Amino acid sequence: MTEQQFRGLEVRDLVKKYPKAERNVFDGISFDVPKGQVLVIVGPSGSGKSTLLRTVAGLEPIQGGTIALDGDVLETGKPGTEKAGRSKRPSALRTRIGMVFQSYDLFPNKTVLGNITMAPVLVQKRKKADVEAEAMALLERVGLADRADAKPHELSGGQRQRVAICRALILHPEVLLLDEITAALDPEMVREVLDVVLDLADDGQTMLIVTHEMQFARAVADRIVMIEDGRIVERSTDPDEFFAHPKTERAREFLHTFE
Ligand code: ADP
Ligand code: MG
C-alpha cells in the first residue's frame, strides 16, 4: 500500500531571522493548510503575520524548517541566509503561491487589463489573446469588467484591491496569500473586497489569510491560528468555537479588543 500524500501547504519548524535583529521572528512554527481550505491567521501588530506570509511566498529567506506544497518541498531553511534578499526558490515553484498585499501595488501607467496580463504574457510567455480573455473573465467575476481600460488612479481603493486579486489569480496559484488586504480601505469598500474572497473560498481556492476583520475571519476560515511574538498561542479547526469560546486567556483578551 502506498502512503497517502498530503495535499496542500505544509509549513514545518520554520525559523526566520532578520539581519541585525537580536532574536528570531519565528523559532520553529508549524501548520498545515489542506488543499481547498482557508487558514486565517490573527494576532496583534508586530507578532510576525506578514513575515510568515512573506516567507511562505518566497519573498524572504528562511533559516530553518521546510515549506512544502502537495509533498513537493519548495524550500528548506539554511542558517546564515539572513541577508540573502529573496529566497532561492526556483521561479517555477514560486508561481505556485500567489500573494496580495495591504497596499495595492499596481503599475500606475498600465491599464487594469495591462496590470493583470503583464506577468502571464511577459514571464510565462502565454498567448496574449488567451490571457486577455481570461483576464476579462476574472474582471467579470469581481464586478469590474467595465473598468478594464481604466488606469489605477481612476479606481477606488476597493476596486484596486479587486484588480490586485485578479492579477494574482491569473497565475493560477495553488495557494493564495492575503495580507490584510482591506486594512488600508475606507470602511464602505471593505465588503466588496471581502465578498470576492468569500466567493474564492466557496470555489475551493486554498488560502492563507491575515486579517483584522473578525466577522469575516469567522465566516471564511476552516482553521484559525493566533500568533503572538512569533509563537502560536492557540489554534482551532472550529472557527465558531474559537471566536465564541477561546481556550486561552491571551486569545480572549485579544478578541475582546475587537468587540
Ligand atoms: P505583523 O505583520 O504581525 O504586524 P511583522 O511580520 O510585520 O508583524 O513583524 C514581525 C517582527 O519582525 C516585528 O518585530 C518587526 O519589527 C520585525 N520586522 C518586520 N520586518 C522587518 C525587517 N524587514 N527587518 C527587520 N525586522 C523586521
Ligand atoms: Mg503585517
Image (tube, rainbow, N blue to C red):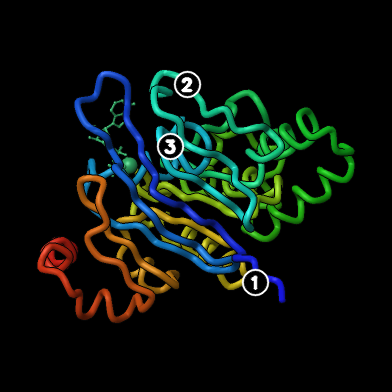
Q: What kind of residue is marked 1?
A: Gln
Residue 218 appearing in the image:
yes
Task: Kindly identify which residue carries mark 2.
Answer: 85
Q: Which mark is residue 4?
A: 1
Q: Considering only order in the chain, which callout, 3 or 1, is on the residue closer to the N terminus?
A: 1
Q: Residues within 10 Å of mark 2 (few under 14, many from 20)?
A: few
Q: Nearer the viewer, mark 2 or mark 1?
A: 1
Q: Is the C-beta separation of discs 1 and 3 under 8 Å?
A: no
Residue 156 appearing in the image:
no
Instruction: Look at the image and tell me in which quarter the C terminus lies.
Output: bottom left
Name the residue located 58 percent from the left edge and 73 percent from the top edge.
202
Name the residue located 72 percent from the left edge and 76 percent from the top edge.
1
Horizontal side of 157 relative to 17 (left or right) equals right
Residue 177 percent location from the top left of the image:
50, 50
Q: Considering only order in the chain, which callout, 2 or 3, is on the residue closer to the N terminus?
A: 2
Task: Kindly identify which residue carries mark 3.
Answer: 103
Of the pair 132 and 79, the residue shown nearer to us: 79
Image height check: is 254 above or below 22?
A: below
Q: Residues within 10 Å of mark 3 (few under 14, many from 20)?
A: some
Query: What whole-number distance in Å separates the C-alpha atoms at marks 3 and 2?
Result: 21 Å
Horizontal side of 127 relative to 185 (left or right) equals right
Of the pair 142 and 172, the residue shown nearer to us: 172
Splitting the image into four quadrants, where does ligand 2 fall? top left
Q: Quadrant of residue 137?
A: bottom right
The number of numbered badges drawn on the structure is 3
Question: For the residue labelled by badge 2, is the local secondary structure a helix, a strand or a loop?
Answer: loop
Query: What whole-number distance in Å separates the C-alpha atoms at marks 2 and 1?
Result: 36 Å
